[in-house]
Amino acid sequence: MTQIRIGSAPDSWGVWFPEDPLQVPWTRFLDEVAASGYEWIELGPYGYLPTDPARLAGETAARGLRVSAGTVFTGLHHGPGVWDATWAHVADVAALAQAAGARHLVVIPSFWRDDKTGEIKESDTLDAGQWGQLTRLTERLGHEVRERFGLRIVVHPHADTHIDTEENVTRFLDATDPDVVSLCLDTGHYAYCGGDSVRLIETYGERIGYLHLKQVDPAVLAQVRAEQLPFGPAVARGVMCEPPEGVPALGPVLDAARKLGTDLFAIVEQDMYPCAPDRPLPIARRTRAFLRSCGA
């Protein structure tokens, strides 16, 4: 049976950016995530937590916390011309994650529309050539990150990106080498885009390398779709909700994951940017208690 390690992330404290006056200070995030009963955390946006490895290690150890992964954003469908800039960003995050003892690097594709203004930056559909660039360069990224930093990349399907729906996620998985590319299944984003997390785990279980636990409010999602809102305003409206009030049901997701026979991290991420500073802690405590009731 799979061992599932539960954690949380700065995202669940309304943190999307390295610096933002609407976000809680990083010290408060660390204090409160530990007080909520979590042992594992992600780094969040690079620069939010200390980037000096020794300081980060001291701050996390003092609170009994450990790091599961770092996160990067990429636009690899644009081809080799973006590789150098992408790698510079990836290398910084991967080096810090490695120093912190993490084993994974979460890779999120770039957005096709601005997540604040809704401005369309490019087509929401890739052509065959762009799909080829995306898959080839993601495989290269997975190989380089593994060889240089000893981390495994886990690609994160995300709303308003080109890896979003079941069709696009399975197309991506079918076109990439499982030896170097795994999936970070975010249950909220996948439901937001119409996907069934349990079915994906049962069908592509060998590709699931990491989980983000998240739920969507179906009523708010219906409004988002009707108004064609971009992801940022959708979050501000409350499309990502506190478990167990939304979908998908997380108990069946965890049950399916346990049957995979491999160790997995399952990191709680309730998108809440922006939010009142006193809101995240009680939600985090309730969510941790709920997940214990699911056997996690």
Image (spheres, rainbow, N blue to C red):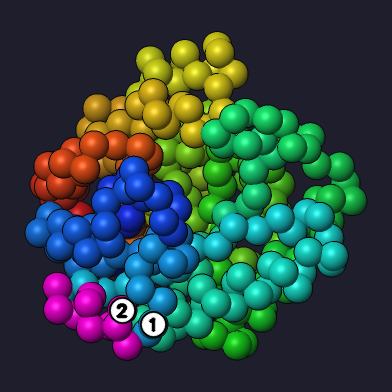
Disc number for residue 76: none
Q: Which mark is residue 52?
A: 1
Q: Quadrant of the C terminus?
A: bottom left
At numbered mark 2, what does the secondary structure look like: helix, strand or loop?
Answer: helix
Span of residues in magenta? 54-63
| Residue 258 visible to the viewer | no
Residue 221, given in percent of the width and then of the height, sits at 45, 21
Is 180 located above or below residue 42 in the figure?
below
Do the residues under discs 2 and 1 have CB atoms within 8 angstroms?
Answer: yes
The foreground one among 84 and 226 is 84
Horizontal side of residue 166 vs 34, given as left or right: right
**Residue 56: mark in rendering:** 2
Residue at (29% x, 83% y) in the render: 55
Asked whether, in this view, residue 8 is left or right of residue 239, the answer is left
- Residue plotted at (48% across, 39% down): 189
Is 158 drawn above or below residue 89 in the view shown? above
Which quadrant holds residue 159? top right
The quadrant the N terminus occupies is bottom left
